[in-house]
Amino acid sequence: MNTLHRCTLPLFLALPLAASAAPDEAALRAIVDKTIQPLMAEHDLPGMAVAVTVGGQSAVFNYGLASRADNKAVDERTVFEVGSVSKAFAATLTAYAQVQGKLALTDHPSKYWPALKGSAIDKATLLHLGTYTAGGLPLQFPDELTEPEPLRYYRDWKPAARPGAIREYSNPSLGLFGHLTARALGRDYADAVEHLLFPAFGMTSSYVNLPESARPDYAWGYRDGKPVHFTGEPFSAVTFGVRTTAADLLRFVQANMAPQQLDPAMRRAVEATHVGYFQVGGMTQGLGWEQYAYPVKLQTLLEGNSESMIWERHRARAVATPTMPITPTLYNKTGSTGGFGAYVLFVPAQKIGIVMLANKNYPIPARVTAAYAILQALASQDVPQK
């Protein structure tokens, strides 16, 4: 196991939360260390960055190595691949386009990609694509597919159910969702994320197209002991293309926890991603984020993030009146690439948010269990208010 490298990074954010109970820095460090140190040892994780916000206090704790080859430690500048956490940005961009009047979730794909007119996929709406309920699009594109815009794939696709009947987690579904949004905006998807979203959240070290200037800070992911970075596939910029630091991703989390401090259009966009549309077991599927009534049992959270939920079809029950939750809610999203594993969790009512980034794709149940342990420790803190 690599020697632990740890530090805290005060975050001078443009989006502070209201004052609330929060542990001091030493107590916060102790809570995170207690969970993360054994997690890294058990799964032989080269490095991690864990960002936490609680009651308005935020810090980043860095562990291990960003590169084993040159013994480079993870620090506050280290850039990680966040995998499918990228989907939360795609959802936010689509919601922002809707606020701008560029599209509607009730629109059908052919409105923005006319070549899809008359195909089965055109019976779905943008909402179905964004919630994985188009009718059975699979988790991944076929391995042999190399087209950057896989028109033939979508035109030939045969649904397994009517739109809205089943939920099947899917990169082709969310990828098309983001691609159609870019078409509606009339601009390149990566450009829209980098120039519309990242600046709105104060994310200055986040990328879809990684510039040469950021490469020295780009962590190596590890798979079977070998250093790797992700390679592209159709619409990968949408589905798993964001690379960012723990501090920057925490800024996005804080914006989701306190959207009232964003400009009005972006506030409405963020709030739109908190609306739940389909109930799938104990989880409610929104745009990007997956929701649970809080407090939630660990087992319920594990079931909602299980292999079954990733790989299999599940009956979806439409929410009768989709609205933002009025009761306490936990939002979360996992993300993985070949060499990285990410997990994000936040509970606005508790003023608690957690970002966990690792440069190894380790089991999702371990991520969820670790974040839940930190959440429970933070939520149970009996300390004076700041």
Image: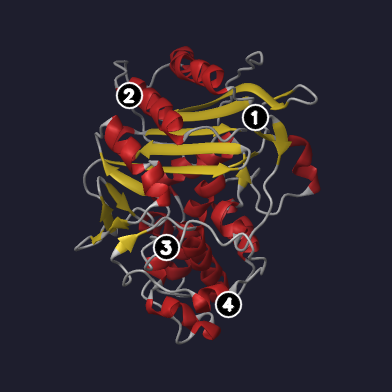
The residue closer to the viewer here, 191 or 235, is 235
* Residue that label 4 marks: 152
Q: Looking at the image, tell me whether mark 1 or mark 4 is earlier in sequence order.
A: 1
Q: Picture coordinates of residue 119 (x, y %)?
A: 46, 82
301, above or below 280, in the image: above
C-alpha distance separating marks 1 and 3: 32 Å
Q: Is disc 3 placed on a helix, strand or loop?
A: helix
C-alpha distance separating marks 1 and 4: 43 Å
Q: Is disc 1 placed on a helix, strand or loop?
A: loop
Three-letter amino acid code at the position of disc 2: Gln
C-alpha distance separating marks 2 and 3: 30 Å
The quarter of the displayed image where residue 103 is located: bottom left
Q: Looking at the image, tell me whether mark 2 or mark 3 is earlier in sequence order.
A: 3
Q: Is disc 2 placed on a helix, strand or loop?
A: helix
C-alpha distance separating marks 4 and 3: 20 Å
Q: Looking at the image, tell me whether mark 2 or mark 1 is earlier in sequence order.
A: 1
Q: Quadrant of the N terminus?
A: top right
Residue drawn 37% across the image and 23% down it: 373
Front position among marks 1 and 3: 3
Three-letter amino acid code at the position of disc 4: Arg
Neighbours of disc 4 within 10 Å: few (<14), some (14-19), many (20+) = few
Q: Looking at the image, tell me whether mark 4 or mark 3 is earlier in sequence order.
A: 3
* Residue that label 3 marks: 130
* Residue that label 2 marks: 376
